[in-house]
Amino acid sequence: MRAQALDFAAVAAVVVFVAAAGCAGNARVDLAAADALDSLAAATRTALVEYHDELEAADSRRESAAIDAFIARIRRDNDDEQLCAAHAAAFKTALARVREDRHVELERYRAALDNADTAVEVADGLRRLAVQSLTLEDETRRYLLSLLETVHPANEPVEESATVGGGDATQPDPNNPHNGGTNP
């Protein structure tokens, strides 16, 4: 039951973080969401390992109790073959239940770990998206700055009567490399 709750929590967190990061379109939000998903995945893995270990210990105790009970019954009823056969059948049934419970728990454990791995994959995807987003923003910023410098060179005062591309086109500006100058 706890494993199902952990599965649900992991999936719900992934959906919330992906929705929030996808809507924002901001690299910082994507990176923060990726970090949160990594933290969630690490906490989920820790909880799963602890829970799995607790169940393994409990199953081992159940198995030992079944063995001890079987030995005690056989010692007590060793003269009655029919009763010993019934004890053996009960013992086999008890061990089969323990094995079945271990199998089910192991499948749930693996599925929950897969969910944690999925959260890490989503976090990695968010990081890649954030890096691509930053790269696009940087390229856009460089383009816009160069466009602004072309329209209004850095050392050229902007007059109210100046038009786009204004200034004296016959004279190169020594401070503007886009307008015939040499200084960067």
Image (tube, rainbow, N blue to C red):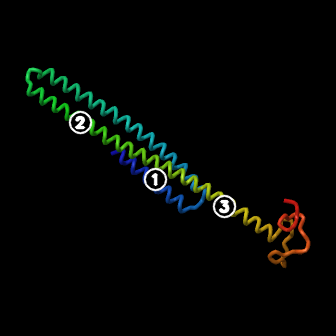
Say if 125 sits above or below 177 in the image: above
Work out whether mark 1 precedes mark 3 in sequence or the reverse, and give the earlier one: 1
> 124 or 69, which lies in front?
124
User: Picture quarter containing residue 97?
Assistant: top left
In space, the residues marked 2 and 1 are separated at their CA atoms by 37 Å
Left or right of residue 70, residue 1 in this image: right
Three-letter code, disc 2: Ala
In space, the residues marked 2 and 3 are separated at their CA atoms by 61 Å
* Element assignment for label 3: helix
The image quadrant where one finds the N terminus is top left
The numbered mark at residue 96 is 2
Say if 114 sits above or below 94 in the image: below
Three-letter code, disc 3: Glu
Say if 74 sits above or below 3 in the image: above
Three-letter code, disc 1: Ala
The numbered mark at residue 13 is 1
Pointers 2 and 1 in contact (CB under 8 A)?
Answer: no
Which residue does the numbered mark 3 point to in the structure image?
Answer: 137
> 47 or 153, which lies in front?
153
Going 84% across and 79% down the picture, which residue do you hit?
Answer: 161
